[in-house]
Amino acid sequence: MTTYASEPIEVYLPQEEYNALQTLATARGVSLAELMHEGVAAVLAQASETLASAEETIDVEEPPDGDPLRDIIGMIDSGLGDLAENHDRYLAEFIEAESHPWLAKSS
């Protein structure tokens, strides 16, 4: 038995696509909803196959040990214990301060 989501999904289609789906559903003797379920299942199956084959072909290489960028890791102590998690916020604050120096906090 299939379990369905508790909320329906509302989709707006161009009139010609809607008409074509209605015609196809009638020709196959199924409801429009059943046809949509079949379509979603087919798209998900194809996407699953595509992702599986892509994962097999992707070869992620680690940078070589001699990579000069590895040497800069940890060179500077920012004094911020949460820099990795909040780097976007800190960068935005820096850009804002540089863009509007007259708003800089005075000590």
Image (cartoon, helix red, strand yellow):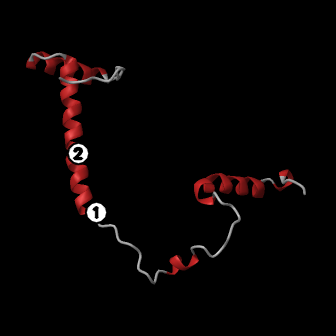
* Residue found at x 71% / y 65%: 79
Residue 27 x/y as whole percent:
9, 18
Residue wearing tag 2: 48
Q: Which amino acid, mark 2?
A: Ser
Disc 2 crowd, CA 10 A, few/some/many (<14, 14-19, 20+): few
Q: Is residue 73 above or below residue 48?
A: below
Q: Is 58 displayed left or right of 91 in the figure?
A: left
Based on the displayed image, in which of its 4 quarters is residue 13 positioned? top left
Residue that sits furthest to the left in the current view: 28
Query: Gap in Å between the C-alphas at discs 2 and 1?
Result: 15 Å
Residue 4 x/y as whole percent:
27, 23
Residue wearing tag 1: 58
Foreground residue among 82 and 16: 82
Residue 21 x/y as whole percent:
20, 22
Disc 1 crowd, CA 10 A, few/some/many (<14, 14-19, 20+): few
Please tell me which of labels 2 and 1 falls first in the chain. 2
* Residue found at x 58% / y 55%: 85
Residue 5 x/y as whole percent:
32, 24
Residue that sits furthest to the bottom in the current view: 66
Q: Is residue 92 above or below residue 20?
A: below
* Residue found at x 18% / y 21%: 34
Based on the displayed image, in which of its 4 quarters is residue 64 positioned? bottom left
